[in-house]
């Protein structure tokens, strides 16, 4: 009976260790994805802003009142 309980406890501890490792792996994965998103925003930020501004200007020029878009 004691041996059985020892096996159960050892298996439970091993499972807890794997959960901790999985959490660390997921954390590293999320950090890597966040770093890629930040890098893309810094590298392409001006181009994205220009594309949105061009679209906004085009909509404003075709609109009835022709008012400016709010860009900032």
Image: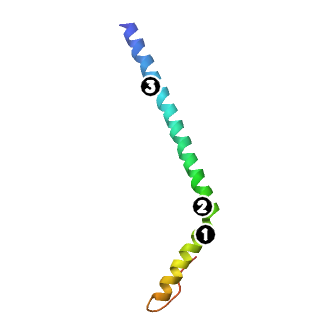
Q: Are marks 3 and 2 in contact (CB under 8 Å)?
A: no
Q: How many marks?
A: 3
Placement of the N terminus among the 4 image quadrants? top left
Q: Camera-side residue: 66 or 62?
A: 62
Q: Which mark is residue 15?
A: 3
Depicted 37 relative to depicted 45: above or below: above
- Which residue carries the number 1 mark? 47
Q: Nearer the viewer, mark 3 or mark 2?
A: 2
Q: Earlier in the sequence, mark 2 or mark 1?
A: 2
Q: CA distance from mark 2 to mark 1?
A: 10 Å
Q: Helix, strand, or loop for circle 1?
A: helix
Could you say where residue 43 lies in the image, as x and y percent from the top left? 64, 61
Q: Are marks 2 and 1 in contact (CB under 8 Å)?
A: no
Q: Nearer the viewer, mark 1 or mark 3?
A: 1
Q: Helix, strand, or loop for circle 3?
A: helix
Q: Are marks 1 and 3 in contact (CB under 8 Å)?
A: no
Could you say where residue 53 lies in the image, as x and y percent from the top left? 56, 77
Could you say where residue 47 lies in the image, as x and y percent from the top left? 60, 69
Could you say where residue 68 lies in the image, as x and y percent from the top left? 53, 86
Q: Is residue 32 left or right of residue 19?
A: right
Q: Earlier in the sequence, mark 1 or mark 3?
A: 3
Asked if one can make out residue 69 in the rendered structure from this viewpoint, the answer is no
Which residue sits furthest bottom?
A: 65
Depicted 1 relative to depicted 16: above or below: above
Which residue sits furthest left?
A: 1
- Which residue carries the number 2 mark? 41
Asked if one can make out residue 11 in the rendered structure from this viewpoint, the answer is yes
Q: Nearer the viewer, mark 2 or mark 1?
A: 1
């Amino acid at each position: 009976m004691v041996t059985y309980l020892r096996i159960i406890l050892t298996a439970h501890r091993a499972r807890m260790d794997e959960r901790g490792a999985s959490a660390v792996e997921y954390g590293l994965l999320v950090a890597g994805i966040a770093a890629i998103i930040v890098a893309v925003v810094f590298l392409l930020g001006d181009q994205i802003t220009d594309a949105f501004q061009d679209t906004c200007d085009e909509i404003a020029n075709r609109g009835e009142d022709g008012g400016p878009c709010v860009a900032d």
